[in-house]
Amino acid sequence: MPEKETLERARKDKREGKAPSTQAGEFVKEEIEHIREGKHGTRSTKQAIAIGLAKARRAGVDLPPSEGSSEETKEQARRDMKRAGKKPSAKRSRATRKALKKEGRKAASKEALSTQARKAAKKRSAASRSRSAKKAARTRKK
């Protein structure tokens, strides 16, 4: 279950009319914090992000899978969205936490996150990156 503060921040983002990906970002941030605190680990930064996005979908954020996702990922995203608002299984949560505890903590390091961001940006076109930068400049708080 996500923390109350995370849910509040996501709701605030929704009220302000921000994009679903921005709302989901709060859950990803929470997941990174959990890894840094030593609550659990992950095999990769991608996995940490995926866990955060799944939590967001289960918390009710209307976040469809990206077009470039595999069929399995799209199917799992649909399942997560369907589970929105339902209480997670205690047995499954325990098993997942136990498995994740055995994984490393390096995935949440600044270096790992920076590498992941660069790799993700490299896959995008120059026009797409430029559009995002212009929108960020336009919508930045003054």
Image (cartoon, rainbow, N blue to C red):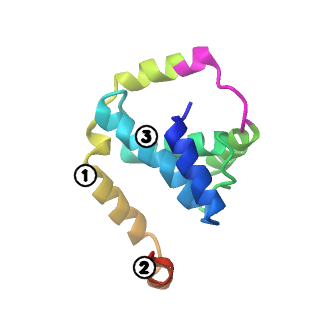
The N terminus, quarter of image: top right
User: Viewer-nearest of labels 1 and 2?
Assistant: 2
Residue sitting farthest toward the top: 91
- The answer to whether the residue labelled 3 contacts the one labelled 1, judged by CB atoms less than 8 Å apart, is no
- Give the residues drawn in magenta, as a range: 83-93
- Which residue is more in the foreground, 141 or 68? 141
Residue under circle 3? 31
- Establish if 43 lies above or below 135: above
Name which of mark 3 and mark 1 comes first in the sequence. 3
Taking the magenta stretch, the answer to whether it contains residue 66 is no
> Helix, strand, or loop for circle 3?
helix
Identity, as a three-letter code, of the amino acid under mark 1: Lys
Number of the label disc, if any, that sits on residue 142: 2
Name which of mark 1 and mark 2 comes first in the sequence. 1
Q: Is residue 2 left or right of residue 105?
A: right
* Residue at 68 percent of width and 26 percent of height: 87
Residue under circle 1? 110
The C terminus, quarter of image: bottom left
Name which of mark 3 and mark 2 comes first in the sequence. 3
In the image, residue 122 lies at what x, y percent? 39, 71
- Establish if 96 lies above or below 56: above
Identity, as a three-letter code, of the amino acid under mark 2: Lys
Identity, as a three-letter code, of the amino acid under mark 3: Glu
- Crowding around mark 2 (Cα neighbors within 10 Å: few <14, some 14 to 19, many 20+) is few
Taking the magenta stretch, the answer to whether it contains residue 92 is yes
- Crowding around mark 1 (Cα neighbors within 10 Å: few <14, some 14 to 19, many 20+) is few
Observer able to see residue 43:
no
Q: Main secondary structure of the magenta part?
A: loop
